[in-house]
Amino acid sequence: MSLTSPLLQLPLSQFKSLSLSTPFINGSSSLSRLSKPSSSITSPNPSPPAFLPPIRAMRSMQGRVVCSTNDKTVSVEVTRLAPHPKYKRRVRKKKKYQAHDPLNQFQVGDFVQLEKTAPISKTKTFLAVPVPPRNQPKPKEEENLELGLPLESSLQQS
């Protein structure tokens, strides 16, 4: 009784002449067959847009200076509103960041804007920039000359 099958005893030259119809022999395949099918609606080679703007998420924040004792460094507390995980009510979340203050110009209580920069030290990656106060009265100009013409009431007084 023979352990080998009769097909294995045939000469190998018989099998070399056979060719398989599939291109996936030994992992080789043509790239044209693997590409996605193209539809007649879209162009075969869509060109990418010429300019893609960079995504600038969280590049600047506003906060209040809470500590300015260190040299050229201020600690800024940023408050944001985020939904509560369970109750979905907006709650205030506070986080402190270290910011670079090269001129030591900020005092405790000042409002600053934090601009993202290259890391300055282990914990400092922001630059503190002054923010103008929000409720500052506008400089008074001639209210009578809104349209460029003086009002009749102002003409009668003079």
Image (cartoon, rainbow, N blue to C red):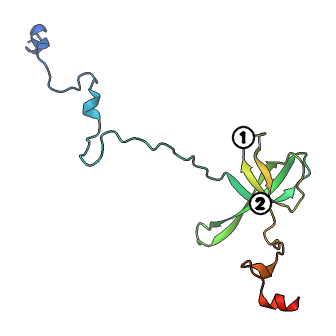
| Nearer to me, 62 or 50 | 50
13 over 38 or under it: above or below: above
Residue type, numbered disc 2: Gly
The numbered dot on residue 91 is none
Q: Which residue is painted at 85% across and 61% down in the image?
A: 110
At which x and y percent is residue 51? Answer: 51, 44
Residue 20 is left or right of residue 44, and the answer is: left
- The amino acid sitting under disc 1 is Ala
- Going by the image, does 79 lie left or right of 29? right
Query: Residue at left 83%, top 88%?
Result: 155
Image-based side of 15 in relation to 26, left or right: left
Name the image quarter holding residue 135.
bottom right
Instruction: Give the residue pinned by disc 1.
Output: 118
Disc 1 or 2, which lies upstream in sequence? Answer: 2
- Other-residue count near label 2 (Cα within 10 Å), few / some / many at <14 / 14–19 / ≥20: many
Q: Quadrant of residue 138?
A: bottom right
Q: Residue at x 14, y 22 (%)?
A: 20
Q: Secondary structure at mark 2?
A: strand
The image shows residue 52 at horizontal and vertical percentages of 52, 45
Along the line of sight, which residue is nearer the eye, 49 or 17?
49
- In this rendering, the answer to whether 90 lies above or below 8 is below
Q: Residues within 10 Å of mark 1 (few under 14, many from 20)?
A: few
Q: Secondary structure at mark 1?
A: loop
Provide the residue designation for mark 2.
63
